[in-house]
Image (cartoon, grey):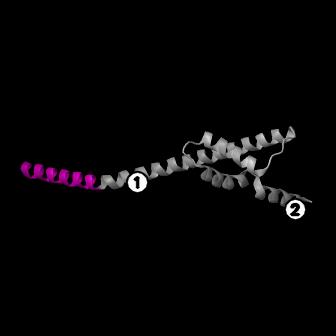
């Protein structure tokens, strides 16, 4: 009876090993997909923070110039923003930085949408 039990155990072990081996790539893919999503979300949050920091630094630069009676136009602010963004974020292009800035400006209450929001809030509260 023991030889039969030994053979059944070997067969069971073989089946389990094959099943685990077959399922391993699927399990690893699920783990890596989840990890990559977390890393991507984390990277996106960092990128948004860098862009917001660059926008705020540009606004501070413009305010300092205006206080010193030095005229500042949209082109100068865009150039300053691009310079700051390219310094802070390696591998980003100027076009990418500007597109990201357009997405982040409303979150900071800046840009045309920020102006419209402040006007709307003023009208609604009066």
Q: Is residue 65 left or right of residue 29?
A: right
| Between 30 and 93, the one nearer to me in the picture | 93
Structural distance between the alpha carbons of marks 1 and 2 = 49 Å
Q: Quadrant of the C terminus?
A: bottom right
Q: Quadrant of residue 124?
A: bottom right
Q: Is residue 97 left or right of residue 64?
A: left
Q: Is residue 92 left or right of residue 126?
A: left
| Between 69 and 43, the one nearer to me in the picture | 69
Residue 21 among those drawn in magenta? yes
Q: Quadrant of residue 125?
A: bottom right
Residue reaching furthest right?
126
Up the image or down, 27 lies above or below 50; here it is below
Residue 121 point in image, percent of width and height? 85, 58
Residue 48 point in image, percent of width and height? 63, 48
Ranked by sequence position, the earlier of labels 1 and 2 is 1
Up the image or down, 69 lies above or below 4; here it is above
Q: Assess disc 1: are there few (<14), some (14-19) or many (≥20) residues with their C-alpha within 10 Å of its C-alpha.
A: few
Q: Determine the secondary structure under disc 1.
A: helix
Q: Assess disc 2: are there few (<14), some (14-19) or many (≥20) residues with their C-alpha within 10 Å of its C-alpha.
A: few
Q: Quadrant of residue 87?
A: top right
Q: Which mark is residue 124?
A: 2
Query: Which residues lie in the magenta part?
Result: 1-22
Q: Determine the secondary structure under disc 2.
A: helix
Per the image, the residue denoted by label 1 is 30
């Amino acid at each position: 009876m023991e030889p039969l039990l030994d053979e059944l155990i070997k067969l069971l072990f073989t089946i389990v090993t094959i099943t685990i081996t077959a399922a391993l790539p699927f399990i690893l893919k699920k783990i890596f997909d989840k990890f990559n999503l977390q890393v991507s979300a984390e990277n996106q949050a960092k990128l948004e923070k860098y862009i917001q920091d660059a926008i705020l630094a540009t606004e501070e630069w413009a305010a300092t110039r205006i206080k010193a009676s030095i005229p500042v136009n949209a082109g100068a602010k865009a150039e300053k923003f691009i310079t700051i963004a390219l310094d802070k974020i390696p591998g980003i292009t100027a076009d990418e930085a500007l597109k990201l800035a357009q997405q982040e400006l409303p979150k900071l209450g800046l840009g045309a949408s920020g102006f419209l929001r402040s006007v709307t809030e003023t009208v609604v509260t009066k």
